[in-house]
């Protein structure tokens, strides 16, 4: 696949140990299931896996490194803290590479707009050493994106993408111009939490108790009319309700990052990003989402 033209990205935030997975997601999967998920993703051509040191409570990167990264594309992150320390990006990347058991990452994101120029300067060094192949920024405002792009441009390094929140329920970064700016400048926009931590899944399917489920208490009741509209769209295209939320993002030119721990989830993701919603369906979905006015991330 062309790394500059991904249709979707496999999220790994829940690829942790059994205890953590049950606490946050209500259930866990074994390593063989995760290996089967990787195989399914390769079969569908969804080769990008998005990782971070904290994912799976520190286990996700180690797992994928142990499974083997041949034939897949690794997206990883540097998350700056409040105080800048020289060489902090390099040291963090060295840890990433040790966990991945490889000599480079395909895409490396500056995960917060903190000490942007100093952190990007280190990433540019690593780019020229071919330890990073593409550089992106995450959770940046429009002005911060423009500043990051200008700094990278001055060094002759392209800005690969912006990784910000995006979903049917929360289109803040579209409204504030980031999505349009990305499209105008041939920069990818990756959307995280496109299913809003499970809120945009079928409300009729009961989920096991978890912290995530507790967070959603009281919110689903406000989305009854949106769920009804999503169900109508789902029936039109012979897909499931969460696939409607993913297809909506894809239609907006957003590359959805979706957590997949099981092969069937990869298959549903692939089907969703290849489903074309009509303009009328898009409009009706937006209208119901706006009326509900439910936000998870402030």
Image (spheres, rainbow, N blue to C red):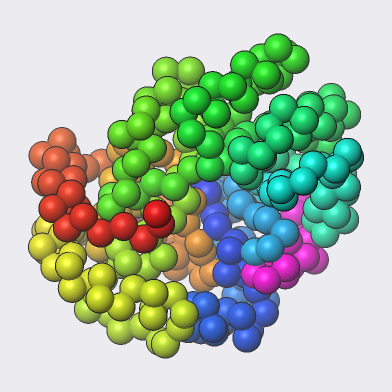
In the image, is residue 193 part of the stretch drawn in magenta?
no
Relative vertical location of residue 294 with respect to residue 32 in this rendering, above or below: above
Image coordinates for residue 144, horizontal then vertical, percent: 55, 29
Q: Is residue 78 left or right of residue 111?
A: right
What main secondary structure does the magenta stretch of the protein show?
helix
What range is drawn magenta here? 56-71
Q: Is residue 97 left or right of residue 140?
A: right
Q: Is residue 111 left or right of residue 198?
A: right
Image point 75% across, 34% down: which residue? 119
- Which image quarter is the N terminus in? top right
Relative vertical location of residue 29 with respect to residue 52 in this rendering, above or below: below
Image point 39% across, 46% down: which residue? 166
Q: Is residue 101 left or right of residue 105?
A: right
- Which image quarter is the C terminus in? bottom left
Image coordinates for residue 264, horizontal then vertical, percent: 44, 68
Report if residue 97 is visible in the image.
Answer: no
The front one of 278 and 136 is: 136
In the image, is residue 70 part of the stretch drawn in magenta?
yes
Q: Quadrant of residue 277?
A: top left
Report if residue 214 is visible in the image.
Answer: yes
The front one of 140 and 128 is: 140
Relative vertical location of residue 15 with respect to residue 20 in this rendering, above or below: above
The total of numbered circles placed on residues is 0
Q: Quadrant of residue 30?
A: bottom right
Image coordinates for residue 263, horizontal then vertical, percent: 50, 67
Image coordinates for residue 9, horizontal then vertical, percent: 52, 49
Image point 65% across, 69% down: which residue? 56
């Amino acid at each position: 696949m062309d790394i500059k033209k991904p249709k979707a990205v496999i999220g790994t935030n829940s690829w942790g140990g059994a205890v953590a997975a049950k606490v946050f997601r209500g259930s866990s999967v074994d390593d063989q299931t995760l290996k089967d998920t990787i195989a399914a993703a390769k079969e569908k051509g969804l080769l990008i896996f998005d990782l971070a040191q904290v994912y799976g409570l520190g286990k996700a990167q180690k797992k994928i490194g142990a499974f083997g990264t041949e034939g897949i594309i690794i997206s990883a992150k540097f998350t700056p803290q409040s105080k800048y320390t020289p060489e902090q990006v390099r040291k963090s990347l060295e840890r990433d590479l040790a966990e991945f058991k490889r000599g480079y990452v395909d895409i490396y994101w500056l995960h917060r707009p903190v000490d942007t120029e100093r952190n990007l300067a280190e990433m540019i060094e690593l780019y020229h050493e071919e330890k990073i192949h593409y550089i992106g920024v995450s959770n940046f405002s429009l002005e911060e994106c423009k500043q990051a792009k200008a700094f990278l441009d001055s060094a002759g390094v392209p800005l690969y993408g912006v990784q910000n929140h995006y979903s049917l329920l929360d289109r803040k970064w579209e409204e504030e111009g980031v999505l349009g700016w990305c499209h105008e400048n041939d920069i990818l926009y990756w959307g995280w939490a496109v299913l809003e931590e499970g809120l945009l899944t079928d409300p009729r399917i009961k989920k096991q108790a978890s912290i995530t489920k507790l967070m959603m208490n009281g919110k689903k009741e406000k989305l009854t009319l949106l769920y009804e509209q999503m169900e109508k769209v789902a029936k039109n295209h012979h897909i499931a309700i969460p696939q409607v939320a993913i297809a909506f993002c894809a239609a907006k030119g957003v590359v959805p990052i979706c957590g997949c721990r099981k092969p069937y989830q990869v298959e549903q993701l692939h089907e969703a990003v290849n489903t074309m919603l009509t303009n009328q369906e898009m409009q009706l979905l937006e209208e119901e989402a706006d009326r509900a006015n439910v936000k998870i991330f402030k």
